[in-house]
Image (cartoon, helix red, strand yellow):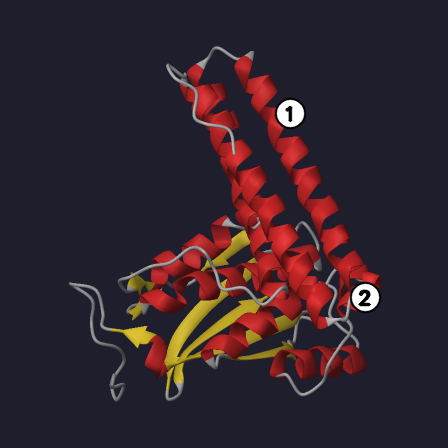
Amino acid sequence: PPPSPAGATNLDLLAHEIAMDRYAAHDAIARATSVVRERAGGSDEKVEVFGNLARRLQSLVHREIEQLDELENRVEDPELLKGLFQVDHLATRIRRYAENLAVLGGAVPRRQWTRPVGMTEVLRSAIAEVEHYSRVKLVPPVEGTLRGHAVADVIHLLAELVENATTFSSPQTVVLLRSQHVTAGLAIEVEDRGLGMPPEEQIRMNALLSGTERIEVEDLLRDGRIGLFVVSELARRHHIVVQLQSNIYGGIQAVLVIPRELLGDPLPGESPGPPGYRRR
């Protein structure tokens, strides 16, 4: 990676960070492709999956750099801040695509937290990683924390579910993200009022999410549901249960249950949970 330029302006530093993101993405592609070649006995068909993801990733990088070029010609601070936010959001999405490649290659996340993180922050972070984040409504914020070692994966899998919900629903609709404590842990629901899913396809996707059926990654990539494969891999690491359900609006509701073992104590000032709820 290129060294950070001496005497750099804020825009120069931002450009450097984008370059670092690009190198990290390329590194993820190389590592994931290497793993898949090894597992698949050198099958080029499996490697093609990562090639398709890589092209999507490179497209995002290109758009990011174009926006940076536009920012360099701006002078007024409000416009600059707006542009910086757009670039930052693209960088966040690039990071998630790179993490998808790493997950498909069997790698662990590079982002790590050593301390518990508030669940409200976890949910908001997941929303922030989605392209159409403005369509997502968090109701209501949940109390409690998530243990540090699970934070990166839970943010990632939630972002994939929310991304799916916004992608397969009308741009005029709202995606709801809500949570509540249940006997098994913490239930989180991602609800859209969109296109729905044929019953046989829903059964197939739930089989993928539960790990009871092996589905070709190429097929998921072709129809735009590669995120569900990533969700299944991340959920399996932490014994998180994920299921898709039809709702009365004709859309899909993704429900996941985070086991109690991954939940930490409430943050200062929060109540310990609903009546009858006890933490281990």
Q: Label 1: which residue?
A: 66
Q: Residue sitting at 51 percent across and 60 percent down?
A: 156
164 horizontally vs 267: left or right: right
Query: Quadrant of the image for the C terminus?
Result: bottom left
Q: How dense is the environment of label 1, judged by Cα within 10 Å: few (below 14), some, or many (20 and up)?
A: few
Residue type of the residue flagged with mark 1: Glu
How far apart marks 1 and 2 lie (CA) works out to 35 Å
Dot 1 falls on a residue whose secondary structure is helix
**Pointer 1 with pointer 2, Cβ within 8 A:** no
Give the x, y percent position of residue 49.
76, 59
Report helix, strand or loop for mark 2.
loop
Q: Residues within 10 Å of mark 2 (few under 14, many from 20)?
A: few
- Which amino acid type is shown beneath numbered disc 2? Ser
* Residue at figure coordinates x 65%, y 64% from the top left: 35
Q: Quadrant of residue 175?
A: bottom right
Residue 107 visible in the snapshot: yes
Q: Viewer-proximal residue, 222 or 112?
A: 112
Q: Nearer the viewer, residue 44 or 132?
A: 44
Q: Answer yes or no: is residue 86 visible.
A: no
Q: For this rendering, which residue is in front, 163 or 230? A: 230
Mark 2 — residue? Answer: 43
Residue at screen point 57% across, 40% down? 23
Residue 29: x and y in percent read: 65, 51
Q: Give the number of marks.
A: 2
